[in-house]
Amino acid sequence: MLFVAVISITAALIFYTIGVWSEKFQGELKKWHFIIFCLGLIFDTLGTIFMSSLSDKRFEFNFHGITGLLAIILMFVHVFWAGIVLIRNNESARANFHRFSIIVWLIWLIPFISGAFLGMRQ
């Protein structure tokens, strides 16, 4: 189970990083970025579920737990908002969406890194 959890979280990192930075470098939000963001969210959620199933506790009110919850919520908002931006097809919103993407990605990295440190300590 730990192996599947680590692979899922790592896949989330790969998908989310590719989606965020390719959107930034390409200069606008595209449909394939949205798909990559969705995959990042799915793998992060799966990895979180698998990791929490390995723990005897459901949720801990500590730095990692709070930032992890915030990150998943922000990822969901990010994916939802990306979908709305694509549906509305506003050129300015598509061109500037990367700013929001980078902020969400940076916040997401906090629990990713703290989780890696917690995992190394155990």
Image (cartoon, helix red, strand yellow):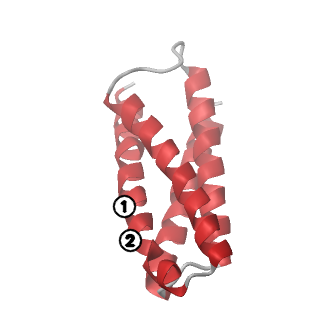
Q: Position of residue 82 (x, y in %)?
A: 58, 66
Taking depth in this image into account, of 117 and 58 the one nearest to the observer is 58
Q: Residue furthest left?
A: 63
- Residue type at tag 2: Arg
Q: Is residue 34 above or below residue 89?
A: above
Seen at 48% across and 69% down, the residue is: 20
Q: Residues within 10 Å of mark 2 (few under 14, many from 20)?
A: few
Amino acid on which disc 1 is placed: Ile
Q: How many marks?
A: 2
Image-quadrant location for residue 33: bottom right
- 10 to 97, vertically: above or below: above
Front residue (pair 61, 48): 61
User: Callout 1 environment at 10 Å: few (<14), some (14 to 19), or many (20+)?
Assistant: few
Q: Which mark is residue 9?
A: none
Is residue 26 depicted above or below 99 in this figure? below
Kind of element beneath mark 2:
helix
Q: Which numbered dot is residue 99?
A: 2
Q: Which residue is mark 1?
A: 103
Tag 1–tag 2 contact (CB < 8 Å): yes
Q: Residue at x 62, y 32 (%)?
A: 49
Can you say which quadrant of the picture contains the N terminus?
top right
Whether residue 120 can be seen here = no
